[in-house]
Image (cartoon, rainbow, N blue to C red):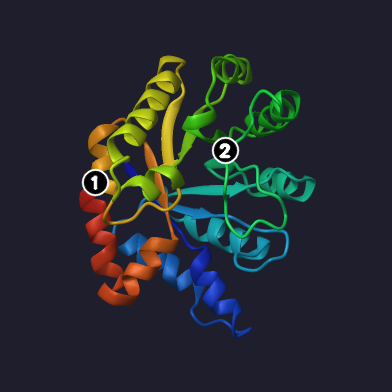
Amino acid sequence: MTRLSVNVNKIATLRNSRGKNQPNLIEAVKQLIGFGVKGITVHPRPDGRHILYQDIRNIKQQLNTQKEVELNVEGYPSADFLQLMEEIKPDQCTLVPDAPTALTSNAGWRIQENRDFLHSVLESLKKDNIRTSLFIDPFTLTEKELHTLDYLQLDRGELYTEIYASAYFTPQKESVTRTYIEAAEKLMNQGIKVNAGHDLNLDNLTWLLKKIPQIKEVSIGHALICESLYQGMETVVRKYLAICGN
């Protein structure tokens, strides 16, 4: 069974576009939980263009009453981001190598190049008993990278799935999927559990989970919200939960 973690950034983006409190982010989180979702993901950006630090505090407070629902916070480990992690202690922190100007996540970590930096950050998260995860690009996962991951003692690796999603309706689907399968196997062989996220949707998720059923969690936001505009959020969420085996 794979946990579905819904990224609620797009709900905050819509709210911010009018500067008021519609849609109400916390009410949306409550609805998602009511539909059966067991994970909420947020990814704050330095410019505050969607989810805000105070939103994350409010969501954490709400989830404190929902013991089965996990909070996953994604982001670049800047000083203020790490301070927030120390304050709220989410269930999982997924580190992403985004530049401040990035429109959306667009790469996995260059693990070897950032070895010492990542080690320091991961150690600080582990002291607060936060599950650690890194964005990992299967196409750059070399033996040196794997050796470094062993040194870092990472809990989970999130397969960055944009390339998979782009290839899904092309002749490269099989070969690209094979690269993801091999990356997942390499991670699991080192005792690292596997998550996945980015551009996953109702069309391509089933195939990915069929090929890598060991995926522990998928983080889905943009596609889920877009699909909900046409089909309704409850309908869409229940479809995702069915795919995930919940």
**As drawn, 15 above or below 49:** below
Is 45 left or right of 28, judged from the image as shown? right
Q: Quadrant of residue 19?
A: bottom right
Q: CA distance from mark 1 to mark 2?
A: 23 Å
Give the SS element for disc 1: helix
Q: Quadrant of residue 29?
A: bottom left
**Can you give x and y, in whole percent of width and height, for residue 108 in the image?**
57, 38
**As drawn, 246 above or below 50:** above
**Local crowd at mark 2 within 10 Å, few (<14), some, or many (≥20)?**
many
**Which residue does the image show at 65% across and 68% down from the upper left?**
49
> Mark 2 or mark 1, which is nearer the start of the sequence?
2
**Which residue does the image show at 67% across and 58% down from the upper left?**
45
Q: Decide which of 106, 92 is in the foreground and name it.
A: 106
Is 238 left or right of 67, judged from the image as shown? left
Q: Amino acid at mark 1?
A: Thr
* Residue identifier under label 1: 206
**Can you give x and y, in whole percent of width and height, for residue 25 in the image?**
50, 71
* Residue identifier under label 2: 108
**Which residue does the image show at 45% across and 50% down from the upper left?**
198
**Can you give x and y, in whole percent of width and height, for residue 152 in the image?**
63, 21
Q: Amino acid at mark 2?
A: Gly
**Which residue does the image show at 48% across and 63% down from the upper left?**
8
Q: Decide which of 152, 70 is in the foreground and name it.
A: 152
Residue found at the very far right of the displayed protein: 79
**What label does residue 194 carry, if any?**
none
Is 37 left or right of 73, judged from the image as shown? left
Give the SS element for disc 2: loop
Q: Is residue 1 visible?
A: no
